[in-house]
Image (spheres, rainbow, N blue to C red):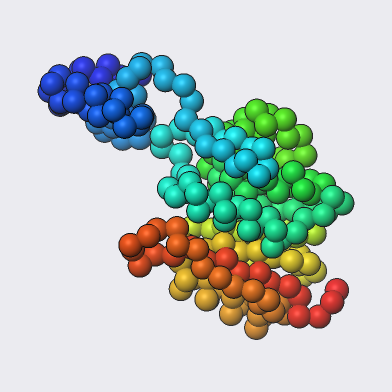
Amino acid sequence: MKDIHSREFDVRPADLARLAAFGRDHSLRVYLQPQGPDSVAPLEPAEPPPLSYRLPEFDVTLHFRPTDFIQVNAEINRRMVAQAVALLDPQPDERVVDLFCGLGNFTLPLARRAARVTGVEAERRLVLRARDNAVRNGIGNAEFRQADLYDEAQARDFWSAIAFDKLFIDPPRSGAMEVLKHLPAAGPRRLVYVSCNPATLARDSEYLVNSRGYRMTLIGVMDMFPHTNHVESIAVFEPARSR
């Protein structure tokens, strides 16, 4: 870890003191990043307690690091997770797959309801963080796999080796078209899709409905980013015909 008083930070000691005071006055944890993500270091104390947030409805606490992706609106995230779990409605005998799972924001709450949940994430550091969060929360029915499902070979290998009943997706802004194209022919009996980009959600919905035989049964928006033109959307898909 870099010395916060080193010249690499190019910040005067008096300014560092002001930042530290601001953090103490407002109960904020201040980190500095003079260069790339690996240079992130706490201002004070040198070894602060872990960063975390809680999802009380599911008795889940998630630890994360400053450079990890988390939802910035903690209250809306808490409600969104609860809504997503309710909409997917995992049963005690069902297996769930959570794609783009990150550090387990949806995976671990889903695991409180389902028989087993498999979280899939491309970034190894987030997979390791998710596994650690499962252990910390005493959740033994969640597993996490590293796989880039945008890669055709990895997607084919993943889908051919897993059995599941329901599917949860929370992709990046680019959406999940490549992933959806490799879904097994039988597909999930219910799919819940959380999106931060209405355009790619519309594109992927069109594919699910017109090419894969699903129907959209519900859609809504969540004001995750107040006073901006960005929204978080949630949609539910079920097979148009019973399988």
Percent x, y of residue 182:
67, 65
**In this view of the protein, which residue sits in the foreground, 121 or 234?**
234
Quadrant housing residue 183: bottom right
Above or below, 58 against 162 in this view is above
Q: Quarter holding the N terminus?
A: top left
Which quadrant holds residue 56?
top right
Given residues 71 and 143, the one toward you in this image is: 71
Rendering coords of residue 105 (x, y %): 59, 45
Q: Residue at x 46, y 73 (%)?
A: 199
> What's the residue at 66%, 44% (across, down)?
57
Q: Is residue 190 above or below residue 57?
A: below
**As rendered, which of 28 and 164 lies closer to the eye?**
28
Q: Position of residue 231 (x, y in %)?
A: 44, 65
Observer able to see residue 160: no
Q: Residue 15: x, y in percent?
A: 15, 25
Extreme residue in the bottom direction: 210
Residue 231 can be seen in this image: yes
State the residue at coordinates (36%, 30%). 27
**In front here: 158 or 175?**
175
User: Looking at the figure, which quarter contains the C terminus?
Assistant: bottom right
Does 169 sit above or below residue 236?
A: above
Total number of numbered discs in the rendering = 0
